[in-house]
C-alpha cells in the first residue's frame, strides 16, 4: 500500500501507512521546553482544515525508552497554556509516571467540532487519535533519532469503548491496548436505571441498612431478609444485572451516578416511551397497583434567572419539597415552549444540566418563562432495561426472558445502548482486536458492572480462536470502584486502582516488547456476579490479597476498654511483586493512622495488632495492603492496593 493511500485497507481498518484525507496536514503551533511539572518538551498542534487538536509531551533523552502512552479522553487542565490545553487522566498519575516508564504522552480532543452529528462516528472513536499517534512518531524521530516508537492506547469507562474501536478497526497504529472499567454495547442507560429503581423502592421503608448489615463482614449473608415482594424483586433484578452487592455501601448518599450524561438520549431516540409506560400493559406504569404511581409528581414554577455557564444553569422561582434530580423541566411558555430539559443536579433552587444538553435549546430559555417540573420520565426510565433485551450473550439481560428465550416485556423499536455504542466505538464491538490487549475491571464498580469485562473477553475469544491466549489478558481489581475513592468514607470501603492501571501499562509494554504475558485473574461468573478465589496463589493477576481476622473470625463482640486482637496476612500472587506497605484503620473511618514497619519487601507478610475501643458502637476495622512489582518502597508508581474489613461490636 502506498504511504499516501487515501483509503483504509480492504478490511476497512486504518493501517499505520494509511493517510486520513481529513487529517493529512498536521501543523504545530507550540513547540517549547517546559519545567512544570517537570522538564519536558511540549508540542501542541492540529490538522489543517479541521477542529482536531493534539498535545504531545516528550521526556529528556535519558528518560526515553522508545514508547508512548496515549489516553483516549481529553481533559481540561487549567494550569496549562496554549490554544487547546489537555491534561492527564487522574487515574494514571502525571507526567512523572509516563516519563518514569520511558514513554512520551499523547492526547487529543477527539476531533472537537468535527464529531458533531451527522459526522462519521469513527472520527471521535479512533480516526483523530490514530492520526495524532502516527504524527507523534514523526516528531519523536526528529527528537530522538530515526526509530519507530511502540504505542499503547488506554481509556476508561466511555474511553474503554474508544479503545475497543481502535483495537478492532486499526492495524499497526498502536501496538497494545488497555481498556479499563469496560461496558457492553447495551449498558446505556440500563446500568443506571436499574440502580435508580432499586434506590427508590428500597429507600421507601429504609431497607438499605439491613441489606448492608447482612452483606458486611460478620453479617448473615442474606440481604433479602425482611424485604417484601417489591423490594426483593428490585434488589434481585439489580444483582442479576450485575450490580455488586457491596456497591450499596454508600446508599445514604448514592445517586443515579452518570445517568445525567445520557438522560436526554431516550427521549430523543424513543419519544413515545413515556406515554406507553404510563398507559399500556406490560409496563410498570401501566399497572395501576404499582407503587410507582404514588411517586409521580409535577410542580409548576417559573425561571427566575438563566446563569451563563457551561453548561448553563437556571435559578428557579420556587422548587417543590420532593427530590427533583433527574426530573424534566417542561417549558410551557416562551421561545422554547414545548421542549423538555432533564435536570443533572440541584442545589437549593439552582438546577444544572448535563454537558450533552442541547446548548441552542438552553439559550432559548429566558427569565420569566413558565416551566413544569415533572418526574414522569425518570420514573419511567427506572425499568427501561425491561424493554431493552439484547442478544443472549449479554447475559445480564437474560433475566427478562421466559423459558423459551423470548422477552417477557414489550420491547422498544430501538436499542439505545447499541446506537450509543456505535457512536462511541465507531462500530459494533466484535472482539476482532488486532494487537495485544490487557483489560482491567473493578469488582465494586456500580457504573461499569464487573461482568461486562467477561462479556468482552468472551467476545474476543470467540473472534480470535486459537490466537486468543496470546492476545488478551484480564485483571479484576477487588474493592475498587469506577472512580478512585475521593472521601475518607470511600477509602474505608474501597481502594484506588490507579497503581494497577499504571502497572498494567508497563506490563502491556513488556508483553509487546519482550513477549512476557501478564498473568490473568482467575474468576468465575455466577448469576452475573464475578467471584475470585480467596487465596492469592489461586487468584493470580496483579493485586495483593488481604486476609484479616478479629479474635480468629470476621466478627467479635467485646467490652469498652477490652484489648481486641487482630491477625492478618497480605500476600501477592505469583510473579506480581512484593508487599511494600500495610496500614491499619481500627475505627474504620478511612484515615489509616497506623502504619506497619514491614522491613524488607517480600511476597507475603503476616501481621498482628491490638487495639482498645473507648466508646461503645459497631466498628469495621480495616487493613489496607500495598504491593509493587519491583518491591520499590520509594516509588509513587505501580502501587497496587487491596483491603479487608472485620466487624467489632463494642458493648
Image (spheres, rainbow, N blue to C red):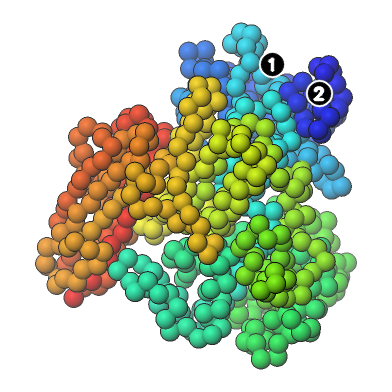
x 37%, y 71%: residue: 221
* x, y percent for residue 417: 72, 58
In the rendered image of this protein, does residue 461 appear above or below residue 557?
above
Alpha-carbon neighbours of circle 2 within 10 Å: few (<14), some, or many (≥20)?
many
SS type, badge 1: helix
Please name which of the two marks, 2 or 1, marks the residue nearer to the observer: 2
Q: Distance between the residues labelled 2 and 1?
A: 13 Å
**Residue linked to disc 1:** 138
The answer to which quarter of the image holds residue 426 is: top right
Q: Is residue 73 visible?
A: no
Closer to us: 138 or 332:
138
Q: Earlier in the sequence, mark 2 or mark 1?
A: 2
**Residue linked to disc 2:** 19
In the rendered image of this protein, does residue 343 appear above or below residue 478?
below
Q: Quadrant of the N terminus?
A: top right
Residue furthest top in the image: 145
Amino acid at each position: 500500500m502506498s504511504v499516501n493511500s487515501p483509503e483504509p485497507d480492504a478490511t476497512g481498518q486504518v493501517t499505520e501507512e494509511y493517510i486520513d484525507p481529513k487529517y493529512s496536514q498536521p501543523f504545530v503551533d507550540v513547540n517549547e521546553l517546559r519545567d512544570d511539572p517537570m522538564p519536558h518538551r511540549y508540542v501542541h498542534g492540529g490538522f489543517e482544515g479541521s477542529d482536531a487538536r493534539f498535545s504531545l509531551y516528550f521526556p529528556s533523552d535519558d528518560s526515553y525508552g522508545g514508547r508512548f502512552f496515549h489516553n483516549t479522553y481529553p481533559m481540561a487542565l487549567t494550569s496549562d497554556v496554549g490554544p487547546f490545553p489537555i491534561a492527564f487522566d487522574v487515574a494514571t498519575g502525571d507526567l512523572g509516571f509516563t516519563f518514569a516508564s520511558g514513554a512520551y504522552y499523547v492526547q487529543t480532543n477527539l476531533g472537537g467540532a468535527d464529531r458533531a452529528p451527522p459526522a462519521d462516528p469513527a472520527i471521535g472513536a479512533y480516526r483523530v487519535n490514530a492520526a495524532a499517534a502516527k504524527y507523534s512518531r514523526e516528531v519523536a524521530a526528529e527528537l530522538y533519532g530515526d526509530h519507530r516508537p511502540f504505542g499503547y492506547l488506554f481509556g476508561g469507562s466511555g474511553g474503554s469503548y474508544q479503545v475497543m474501536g481502535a483495537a478492532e478497526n486499526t492495524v499497526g497504529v498502536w501496538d497494545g491496548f488497555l481498556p479499563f472499567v469496560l461496558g457492553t454495547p447495551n449498558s446505556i442507560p440500563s446500568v443506571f436505571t436499574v440502580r435508580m429503581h432499586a434506590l427508590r423502592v428500597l429507600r421507601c421503608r429504609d431497607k438499605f441498612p439491613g441489606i448492608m448489615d447482612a452483606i458486611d463482614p460478620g453479617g448473615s449473608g442474606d440481604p433479602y431478609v425482611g424485604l417484601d415482594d417489591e423490594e426483593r424483586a428490585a434488589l434481585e433484578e439489580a444483582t442479576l444485572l450485575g450490580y455488586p452487592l457491596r456497591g450499596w455501601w454508600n446508599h445514604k448518599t448514592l445517586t443515579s451516578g452518570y445517568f445525567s450524561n445520557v438522560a436526554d438520549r431516550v427521549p430523543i431516540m424513543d419519544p413515545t416511551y413515556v406515554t406507553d409506560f404510563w398507559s399500556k400493559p406490560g409496563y410498570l406504569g401501566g399497572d395501576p397497583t404499582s407503587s410507582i404511581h404514588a411517586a409521580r409528581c409535577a410542580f409548576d414554577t417559573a425561571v427566575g434567572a438563566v446563569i451563563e455557564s457551561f453548561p448553563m444553569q437556571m435559578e428557579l422561582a420556587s422548587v417543590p419539597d420532593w427530590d427533583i434530580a433527574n426530573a424534566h423541566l417542561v417549558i410551557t411558555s416562551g421561545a422554547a415552549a414545548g421542549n423538555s430539559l432533564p435536570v443533572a443536579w440541584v442545589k437549593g433552587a439552582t438546577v444544572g444540566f448535563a454537558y450533552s444538553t442541547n446548548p441552542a435549546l438552553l439559550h432559548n430559555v429566558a427569565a420569566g418563562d413558565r416551566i413544569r417540573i415533572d418526574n414522569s420520565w425518570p420514573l419511567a426510565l427506572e425499568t427501561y432495561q425491561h424493554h431493552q433485551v439484547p442478544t443472549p450473550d449479554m447475559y445480564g439481560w437474560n433475566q427478562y426472558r421466559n423459558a423459551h428465550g423470548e422477552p417477557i416485556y414489550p420491547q422498544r423499536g430501538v436499542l439505545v445502548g447499541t446506537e450509543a455504542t456505535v457512536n462511541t466505538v465507531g462500530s459494533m464491538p466484535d472482539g476482532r482486536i488486532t494487537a495485544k490487549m490487557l483489560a482491567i475491571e473493578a469488582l465494586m464498580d456500580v457504573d461499569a458492572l464487573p461482568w461486562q469485562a467477561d462479556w468482552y473477553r468472551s467476545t474476543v475469544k470467540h473472534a480470535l480462536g486459537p490466537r486468543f491466549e496470546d492476545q488478551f489478558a484480564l485483571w479484576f481489581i477487588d474493592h475498587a470502584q469506577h472512580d478512585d475513592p475521593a472521601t475518607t468514607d470511600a477509602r474505608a470501603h474501597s481502594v484506588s486502582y490507579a497503581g494497577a492501571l499504571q502497572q498494567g501499562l508497563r506490563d502491556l509494554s513488556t508483553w509487546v516488547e519482550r513477549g512476557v504475558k501478564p498473568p490473568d485473574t482467575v474468576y468465575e461468573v455466577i448469576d452475573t456476579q464475578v467471584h475470585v478465589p480467596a487465596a492469592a496463589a489461586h487468584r493470580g493477576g496483579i493485586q495483593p490479597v488481604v486476609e484479616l481476622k478479629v479474635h480468629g473470625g470476621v466478627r467479635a463482640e467485646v467490652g469498652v476498654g477490652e484489648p481486641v486482637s487482630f491477625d492478618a496476612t497480605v500476600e501477592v500472587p505469583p510473579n506480581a511483586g512484593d508487599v511494600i506497605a500495610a496500614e491499619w484503620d481500627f475505627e474504620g473511618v478511612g484515615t489509616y493512622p497506623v502504619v506497619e514497619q514491614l522491613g524488607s519487601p517480600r511476597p507475603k507478610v503476616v501481621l498482628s495488632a491490638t487495639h482498645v475501643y473507648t466508646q461503645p458502637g459497631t466498628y469495621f476495622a480495616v487493613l489496607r495492603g500495598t504491593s509493587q512489582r519491583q518491591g520499590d518502597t520509594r516509588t509513587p508508581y505501580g502501587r497496587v492496593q487491596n483491603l479487608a474489613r472485620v466487624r467489632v461490636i463494642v458493648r
